[in-house]
Image (cartoon, rainbow, N blue to C red):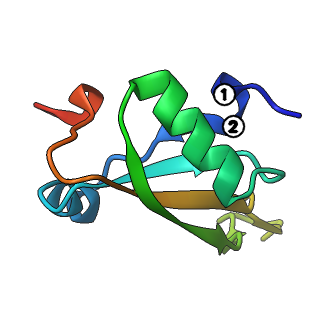
Amino acid sequence: MLSSHEVIRRPVITEKNTMLNTEGKYLFEVAQEANKLDVKRAVEEVFNVRVARVNIINVKGKLRRSPGRRRTEGYTRSWKKAIVTLVPGDRIELYEGV
């Protein structure tokens, strides 16, 4: 079983995500082995908030080609992201002012 700090890898801060923050939704990169219950427990424990629901999305790696003579191809790494919706009235201060 993973600890709470191992489940949540990092917050994902994008333009779209900052618009979701006004609705009480926060985006995190999570461990590949984590499920919805693990993510809910970890967010509640680390940030001391109440979680209403969790949606998980597996993001596949994208094809990347390097320029030059060799023209090698490869993929970026695949990762898992979680959209965490909090109970109305709760906020995560980590995201504020970013």
- Answer few, some or many: residues within 10 Å of disc 2's Cα (few below 14, many 20 plus, some between 14 and 19): many
Q: Residue at x 24, y 35 (%)?
A: 95
Q: Residues within 10 Å of mark 1 (few under 14, many from 20)?
A: some
Question: Residue 37: image x %, image y %?
Answer: 67, 53
Q: CA distance from mark 2 to mark 1?
A: 5 Å
**Image quadrant containing the N terminus:** top right
Dot label at residue 7: 2
Residue 66, above or below 43: below
Q: Residue at x 70, y 46 (%)?
A: 38
Please give the label number shown on residue 47.
Answer: none
The answer to whether any part of residue 12 appears in the image is yes
Callout 2 amino acid: Val
Tag 2 and tag 1, C-beta contact below 8 Å = yes
Q: Position of residue 98 (x, y in %)?
A: 17, 34
Residue 30 visible in rendering: no
Measuring 65% from the left and 59% from the top, which residue is drawn there? Answer: 36
Element at badge 1?
helix
Which residue was labeled with disc 1?
A: 4
